[in-house]
Image (cartoon, rainbow, N blue to C red):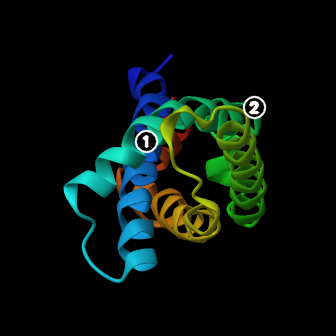
């Protein structure tokens, strides 16, 4: 087993988390028409950090950390979109049943769905291939 193949899911995971939080920042900027103030970002960061754990689980269940998602690029947008719709439903339920955080980001969740979908899709379709995982995999096939 190639160590690059073991690292790839971790890199995908790290990139997904990174882009989830970039999407949150962009969502707040879009929603409020200005760079998010530290207080606004802080009020959203804790609950969205908790939600990121469930979002990664949904991505895992959707197979987004498996090898075939890199190969079937034509299916990748629909798989990511469906996962993000599921993640949004989880987030709505989270904020409805756990009002502890004092925010009800209905509009933010709607914007977030599209922003996070676009960022994660860009990450998966354009940035991940530039990391060269598939190239190494193809080279292994022809070498031996």
Q: Is residue 17 left or right of residue 59?
A: left
Residue that lies at the very extreme toward the bottom in this rendered image: 33
Numbered mark located on residue 39 in the image: none
* SS state under label 2: helix
Q: Residues within 10 Å of mark 2 (few under 14, many from 20)?
A: few
Q: What residue is drawn where x is 49% and y is 37%?
A: 101
Q: Is residue 93 above or below residue 60?
A: below
Q: What residue is drawn where x is 75% and y is 31%?
A: 61
Q: Name the one closer to the observer, 140 or 53.
A: 53
> Which residue is identified by label 2?
61
Q: What residue is drawn where x is 65% and y is 68%?
A: 110
Sequence order check: which comes first, mark 1 or mark 2? 1
Q: What residue is drawn where x is 45% and y is 76%?
A: 31
Q: Is residue 134 left or right of residue 68?
A: left
The answer to whether the residues at label 1 and label 2 have Cβ atoms under 8 Å apart is no
Q: Name the one closer to the observer, 137 or 114.
A: 114
Residue 26: quarter of image: bottom left
Q: Is residue 133 above or below residue 53?
A: below
Q: Name the one closer to the observer, 51 or 42.
A: 42
Q: Is residue 135 left or right of residue 105?
A: left
Numbered mark located on residue 17 in the image: 1
């Amino acid at each position: 087993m190639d160590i690059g193949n073991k690292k790839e899911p971790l890199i995908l995971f790290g990139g997904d988390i990174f882009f989830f939080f970039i999407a949150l920042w962009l969502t707040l900027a879009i929603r409020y028409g200005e760079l998010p103030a530290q207080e606004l970002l802080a009020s959203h960061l804790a609950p969205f950090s908790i939600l990121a754990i469930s979002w990664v689980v949904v991505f895992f269940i959707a197979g987004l950390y498996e090898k075939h998602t890199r190969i079937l690029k034509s299916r990748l947008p629909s798989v990511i979109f469906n996962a993000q719709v599921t993640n949004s439903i989880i987030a709505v339920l989270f904020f409805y049943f756990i009002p502890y955080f004092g925010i009800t980001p209905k509009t933010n969740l709607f914007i977030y769905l599209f922003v996070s979908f676009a960022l994660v899709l860009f990450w998966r379709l354009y940035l991940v291939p530039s990391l060269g995982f598939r190239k190494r995999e193809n080279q292994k096939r022809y070498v031996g």
